[in-house]
Amino acid sequence: MRCLGGVPYCSLIATLLCFSGIALFCGCGHQALTETERLIETYFARNLQEYITLAYVIQYFQYVIYGLASFFFLYCIALLAEGFYTTNVAKQTFGEFRSTMCGRCLSSSFIVMTYVLAVLWLLVFAFSALPVYFFYNMEATCRVVDILTETPASINQLCVDARQYGLLPWNAIPGKACGMTLSNICRTREYQTTYNLYIAAFAGAGVTLLALVHCCLHLAVYQMYVKMLKHRAKEERRGYDLYRRMQRDRGGTLSSPYSADTFDIS
């Protein structure tokens, strides 16, 4: 029970959330980018030179995903270790463990770094919503096409233009999909897989953001808790010293309102 009492459950939950969110974001995001390149190559561009820039951008983002996965794996382990440290300090500040200046500076540094990461990851979370928005509009247009199948003239005017979203240059041919061609694209396995992968990556980014905010608040609360324990101990020590002086000055016996062990604050 003593070992279980020293487990930082809040840090453990935040670490598991961060691991799962990063795994979901990186894994699904990497595969979604690969499927996106395949969709653009098959249905929206006929010449390699028309989407070569997009291919380079996708490759660049995939390398960024590799770096993010490695960084957050190490950072989450460090945060979990910090959670164990702060829990032991909070529970045994005046026992075997003591809160040192180095430890307080380290905890404060983790709070600041986690806060900065949370702010930056908020931008990543917003950015990951863009492909979901694109595929959602595409899905909505496909539903309209399916409803208006009896009027071919109107169907051909319903299009999704990848050039409007900056995925292709304006001279790309065809650059867009209209009518039944668009409806057929929406029925393909590649399209449905890519759409679901982007939704999963967006959810993973949200889970990671939640984990970072949770961890930042948890570390801040424990810092305040340690400060409260130190202040309480100082007050008890000051009262005990006052009692000893009064006992020495009066030469009598006084009943101390404090425990003889000044470090017992449980």
Image (tube, helix red, strand yellow):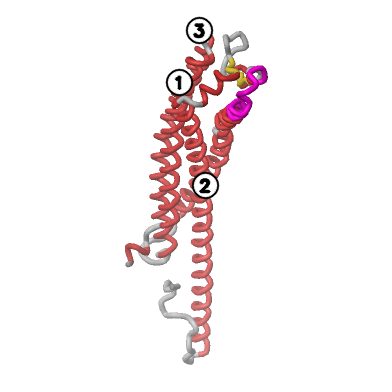
Q: Amino acid at mark 1?
A: Gln
Front-lying residue, 145 or 152: 152
Image mark for residue 154: none
The boundaries of the magenta stretch are 141-154
Image mark for residue 59: 1
Front-lying residue, 215 or 246: 215
Which numbered disc, 1 or 3, marks the residue that appears first in the sequence?
3
Image quadrant holding the C terminus, namely bottom left
Circle 2 is placed at which residue position?
A: 210
Front-lying residue, 21 or 46: 46
Which numbered disc, 3 or 2, marks the residue that appears first in the sequence?
3
Q: Position of residue 186 (x, y in %)?
A: 52, 26
Give above or below for 203 relative to 34: below
Q: Callout 1: helix, strand or loop?
A: helix
Image mark for residue 47: 3
Q: Callout 3: helix, strand or loop?
A: loop
Give above or below for 180 relative to 221: above
Q: Amino acid at mark 2?
A: Leu
Q: Callout 2: helix, strand or loop?
A: helix
